Amino acid sequence: MELNSEVVTSVPRQAATVVMLRDTAHGLEVFLMKRHGLSDVLGGAYVFPGGKLDNSDALLSPPMHLDQDAAHLHSALGEPETDLTTATGLYVAALREAFEESGVLFTQDASAAQLAHAAQMQAQGVAFNQMLQNLGLRLQTSALRPWSRWITPHRPSVTNKRFDTRFFVAAVPEGQHARHDNFETTESIWLKPRQALEQYWDGQIELAPPQIMSLAHLARHASVGSVMAAASLAPPPLILPETFDDQGTRIICYPGDPLHSVSTRALPGPSRVVYRNKRFEPLGGFDALFE
């Protein structure tokens, strides 16, 4: 993973990500997909399903195709400054990206036949909104809980593009199976959060800082229910990483760190990571991710 040294002044692109979870006999697991190595954003890294907000995401009629009204979605997002249309569109974007990238469709009471038809229509290039209209499906926005909001700094760590990304958490619907699309993503895997971080530490997989910190956060929970309950208790934290160089070593600081402009901590785990040994790691080593 190469570090980016370019200062980027563009406005961050609106984006949404779904952290899909499931309970197993071995504990909580999270779904990760490997980005295509030629991708211009986090190529080769393992990520959660997600992508940019499209104009079409705001065009769905909430009464017809969403299970919650726009005002409720806007309130749950916890962003008074964000307009109603954008807030609603972010939920749709998260669910659309989950379907397009992993094949998981969050809808109300969809039959197996409808799910199969939806997958067929996607393979034929039918637009997401058109597919929902053709099949008369309503998106299950209530399956999502806002979890965090990450805004790429002006000096990004691993890419020269900036994003304003809302991370949602959700349990994968019963009976559906997440998988990579063999286009934008080439591999996928379910792992316990700590296990994913262990594989990252051992050099088996690549992770970007938001995924590292999100997995460290999730590792504090034993079940999907615990994650969803925690997400419902408070507005999602706003995480504005700030980057510094110390004699050629890149440092990323998070709110609450002595070097960060915001003194209030936004999320558990280390308040900074440094790039060394060809990876981002906390100053206290691997175990510091969970302190």
Image (cartoon, grey):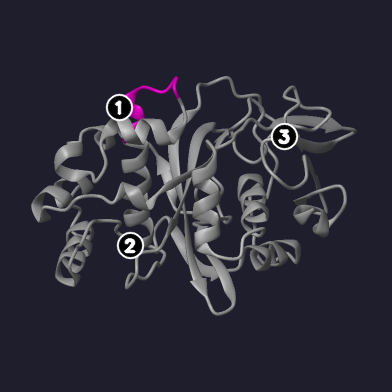
Image coordinates for residue 25, horizontal then vertical, percent: 55, 80
Q: Which residue is mark 1?
A: 85
| Residue sitting at x 80%, y 33% | 257
The foreground one among 146 and 118 is 146
Cβ atoms under marks 2 and 3 closer than 8 Å = no
Give left or right: position of 73 versus 149. left
Q: Nearer the viewer, mark 2 or mark 3?
A: 3
Q: Amino acid at mark 1?
A: Thr
Residue 288 falls left or right of residue 20: right
Q: Residue at x 33, y 62 (%)?
A: 103
Residue position for label 3: 265
| Pointer 3 local density, CA inside 10 Å: few below 14, some 14–19, many at least 20 | some
- Quickly name the residue at label 2: 103
- Say what secondary structure mark 3 lies in: loop
Is 163 situated left or right of 133 in this image? right
| Distance of label 1 from label 2 (alpha carbons) | 25 Å
